[in-house]
Image: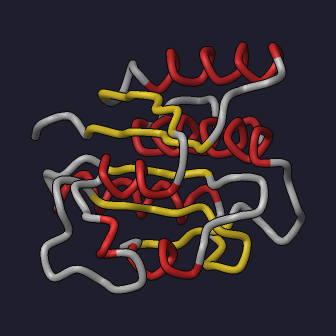
């Protein structure tokens, strides 16, 4: 089975050195399990382009998903436990060869049009997080999902 390709995308530059340090650390950890790439994007249209979706795809589910699968992190969406998220990742890895693009939106969230173009919408929880902190939480959960799938003891100490 080919390694899963993951892209973690966010809109806007990182302002806090501590956030950048944690981002780098979790990207390094995830790279043990999957091909991972960080993408700093200028806006939502750039995100759609990365996914192989034309800007005109915003607001509608495209028939052809493009060159990757878009997963938006959105507080109004489905919540997973860490185990459920690991199951989602494992199922995707087993069934889909396209890269998985997880996207953290700008500070004011994604537009309804971009939400409509995504294949999956996932919430990190009901509490409001800054978009930079949400990125770190997402990265940690992606890493945790791989450790769950591989039976690594990282998760068992919760």
Q: Residue at x 25, y 47 (%)?
A: 99
Q: On the image, which quarter does residue 126 sit in? A: bottom right
Question: Which of 107 and 93 lies nearest the eye of the viewer?
Answer: 107
147 with respect to 109 (left or right): left
Question: Which of 66 and 99 lies nearest the eye of the viewer?
Answer: 66
Q: On the image, which quarter does residue 88 sit in? A: bottom left
Q: Position of residue 15 (x, y in %)?
A: 80, 24
Q: Residue at x 47, y 51 (%)?
A: 102
Q: Residue at x 63, y 55 (%)?
A: 105
Q: Position of residue 96 (x, y in %)?
A: 17, 59
Q: Position of residue 70 (x, y in %)?
A: 37, 61
117 with respect to 28 (left or right): left
Q: Position of residue 51 (x, y in %)?
A: 29, 53
53 with respect to 132 (left or right): left
Q: On the image, which quarter does residue 133 sit in? A: top right
Q: Residue at x 54, y 50 (%)?
A: 43
18 with respect to 42 (left or right): right
Q: Is residue 132 above or below residue 70?
A: above
């Amino acid at each position: 089975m080919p390694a899963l390709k993951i892209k973690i995308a966010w809109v806007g530059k990182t302002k806090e050195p501590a956030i950048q340090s944690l981002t780098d650390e979790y990207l390094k950890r995830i790279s043990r399990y999957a091909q991972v790439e960080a993408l700093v994007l200028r806006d939502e249209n750039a995100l759609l382009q990365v996914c192989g979706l034309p800007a005109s795809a915003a607001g509608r589910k495209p028939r052809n998903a493009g060159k990757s699968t878009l997963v938006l992190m959105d507080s109004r969406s489905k919540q997973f436990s860490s185990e459920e998220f690991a199951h989602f990742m494992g199922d995707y890895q087993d069934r889909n060869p396209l890269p998985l693009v997880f996207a953290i939106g700008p500070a004011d969230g994604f537009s309804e049009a971009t939400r409509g173009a995504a294949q999956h919408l996932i919430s990190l929880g009901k509490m409001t997080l800054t978009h930079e902190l949400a990125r770190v939480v997402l990265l940690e959960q992606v890493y945790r999902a791989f450790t769950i799938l591989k039976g690594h003891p990282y998760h068992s100490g919760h």
